[in-house]
Amino acid sequence: EYNPHRDLPTPHQSIYAKRGMSLEDEINHSNQYYLANHIAVIHKKPTPIQLVKVDYPKRSAAVIKEAYFRRPSTTDYNGVYKGYYIDFDAKETRNKRSFPLKNFHPHQINHMRECIKQGGICFAFIKFTELDLIYLLPATILFNFWDQQESGGRKSIPLATIAKNGYQIGYRLNPRLPYLDAVDQIIANKK
Amino acid sequence: EYNPHRDLPTPHQSIYAKRGMSLEDEINHSNQYYLANHIAVIHKKPTPIQLVKVDYPKRSAAVIKEAYFRRPSTTDYNGVYKGYYIDFDAKETRNKRSFPLKNFHPHQINHMRECIKQGGICFAFIKFTELDLIYLLPATILFNFWDQQESGGRKSIPLATIAKNGYQIGYRLNPRLPYLDAVDQIIANKK
Ligand SMILES: [Mg+2]
Ligand SMILES: [Mg+2]
């Protein structure tokens, strides 16, 4: 069975409450800003659930009595910006030197490959929580390391590689994470 | 509270079992075909759930013990095709003469308006189940009727209007609903 502890949105009363927002919360807030200002429409997808038992009481809302978390078959976020399809996943690591590739599932990598074939813009949003550093890493870099790993290469991406090939996202007031500035650069590089 | 009976994916043992696939099943199958053949990446979003009680037993999967269906804040489907962001909702009606606008929630209409502003392609997938007729209706037509309704106009879109301004989707073997042919025409009209 799928263990959601690592991947699922963390309830607010969790460990994250102590040290502020999770990366996903920060992205969600930024997306709300972008949406309210008609800059982009990007949403987090709901977590897929396997329903087992649902009660339908008369005169009140259906109650799910037994269900399980399913592993998502795609990435967490997608949407549209300046005519481009945007698709990404957000990952946090406590590592200080590199990002472990095991944070990605093979189907997420495959999903991003297919999206790129269709002209979409795909990336990983990576937060080094202990360093408080956030990067947007284009999926093509991620694919290179993923493929190397499968032929016996290293199982993580060095922070130095991410810093060199990715875009650092600094905090701002609004949006908290102005990541579409980095997407603008990816778009400019496409042309 | 949100009543999911009308909108949620229908379990296979439901009324739909008697008369074959639901429209969503047919779209999902078509999307699988498109994905497997690298033609497009379009997925149905999971139904959002409000978690109330989750058990985390040791050594086994988390069990959701109490949860409720939430009303989705966007449409059901989105993805990427030929570089375009695609976004739509699937709706069935048993009416024979018109499509009732109450099948849409205001936030779904707003969501599609925002996506179109960003250059996305949005539409409604409408099935007249009693007539076995399926149409893809561009969102702009839907908006026209939606806005008229709000200023006292009719509360449904006549089938004749849908037939004239939409694209009829006929069944085929594979994909079952070749709706990207209609999207190709929408793309051609954009240029
Ligand atoms: Mg994630
Ligand atoms: Mg629907």
Image (cartoon, coloured by chain):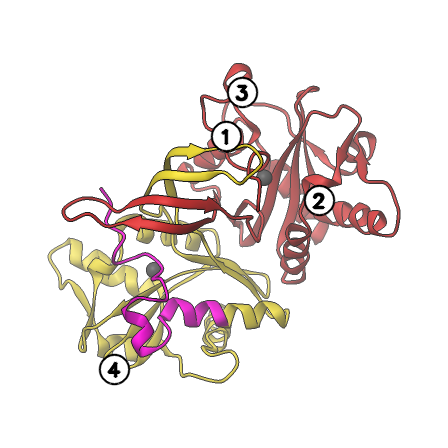
Chain colours: A yellow, B red
**Which residue carries the number 1 mark?**
B10
Report the chain holding disc 3.
B
- Secondary structure at badge 1 equals loop
Look at the numbered discs 1 and 3 and tell me whether their residues touch, using CB distance below 8 Å: yes
Separation (CA) of disc 2 from disc 3 = 29 Å
**Disc 1, ligand 2: is the CB inside 8 Å?**
no
Left or right, A37 with reference to A103: right
Q: Which mark is residue A131?
A: 4
Give the extent of the magenta segment: A1-29
Please tell me which residue lies in front, A93 or B41.
Answer: A93
- Secondary structure at badge 4 equals loop
The residue lying at 82 percent from left, 51 percent from top is B150
For the question of whether residue A70 can be seen, the reply is no
**Which residue carries the number 2 mark?**
B138
Report the chain holding disc 4.
A
Badge 4 and badge 1 in a common chain? no
Report the chain holding disc 2.
B
Left or right, A119 with reference to B161: left
**Which residue carries the number 3 mark?**
B15
In reply to whether residue A5 is colored magenta, the answer given is yes
The local crowd at label 3, few if under 14, some if 14 to 19, many if 20 or more residues have their Cα within 10 Å, is: few
Q: How far from the left and from the top, in percent, is residue B72?
A: 55, 49
Please tell me which residue lies in front, B158 or A67.
Answer: A67
- Secondary structure at badge 2 equals strand
